Image (spheres, rainbow, N blue to C red):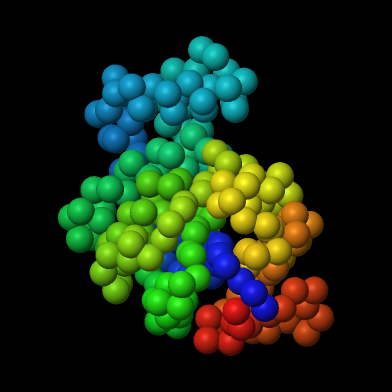
Amino acid sequence: MTIKVILTDIEGTTTDIRFVHDVLFPYARQALPAFVKGHWNDAVVQSIMAEAKLVLEAPDADQTTLIQAFINWIDQDKKVTALKTLQGLIWVQGYKNGDFTGHLYQDAYEYLQRWNEQGIELSVFSSGSVKAQQLLFGHSDFGDLTPLFSHYFDTTTGHKREKAAYVSIASALQQLPENILFLSDIVEELDAAQSAGMKTCLLAREELPENATHNAVSSFESISV
Ligand SMILES: CSCCC(=O)C(=O)COP(=O)(O)O
Ligand SMILES: [Mg+2]
């Protein structure tokens, strides 16, 4: 394989799903009402609220209604860009206080470093906002890993189950899609990347599937580049 860029998902791929669902999401859920009330007049929060009103098709939604909508989206794990942007802002405090560090599998840490040393460009594509991605890798269990990555992409580029997102990413990376290897734990995301021409690898951390339609591994150690 001649891979020039490795594009990686976070949740379920570099990072345990349980860290996202049992630590990050509950932290955001608990801190969200006070954060929104305390930063209500900040331009960035007003812009997030305007985006949420569009999604809700409720131009007159008040603060209480909006807070409840964000809580519902967290509970339903909705990948709404407005929620993802807000969560990124809320998590700043948690990482800064040392309430948690970004979980990373040991093999992900070792191989991201190794590929970087080999001259393979590393980029991230997650539904979490770019800010959230940089917080997680910047305050990871292994320290600040942000220097390893050249680009970060989130849902402002496109949705992870849609081919167009991967076409845009290849273009932003100035690479042919076939030179990019996308790593994810979600088959639908890999299908979309593959349809854009990217190489793909499924991270099946718990159990390897029997009839995988993508190359499947349980650890970064088994990924051939
Ligand atoms: C970037 S850390 C937070 C992860 C997150 O909010 C999320 O929705 C996970 O999405 P992914 O695309 O990485 O599965
Ligand atoms: Mg994932």
Image-based side of 138 in relation to 194, left or right: left
Identify whether 218 is placed above or below 58: below
**Residue extending furthest left?**
97
Q: Is residue 206 visible?
A: no
The residue closer to the viewer here, 107 or 48, is: 107
Tell me where residue 134 sits by quadrant. bottom left
| Residue 61 on image: x %, y % | 50, 18
Image-based side of 76 in relation to 176, left or right: left
Tell me where residue 24 sits by quadrant. bottom left
| Residue 209 on image: x %, y % | 73, 81
Q: Residue at x 73, y 49 (%)?
A: 163
Image-based side of 168 in relation to 154, left or right: right
Identify whether 73 is placed above or below 94: above
The residue closer to the viewer here, 133 or 19, is: 133
Image quarter of the N terminus: bottom right
Q: How many numbered marks appear?
A: 0
The residue closer to the viewer here, 200 or 176, is: 176
| Residue 21 on image: x %, y % | 46, 60
Q: Is residue 177 visible?
A: yes
Q: Residue at x 45, y 78 (%)?
A: 118
Tell me where residue 20 sits by quadrant. bottom left
Q: Residue at x 34, y 35 (%)?
A: 33
| Residue 225 on image: x %, y % | 60, 79
**Residue extending furthest top?**
60
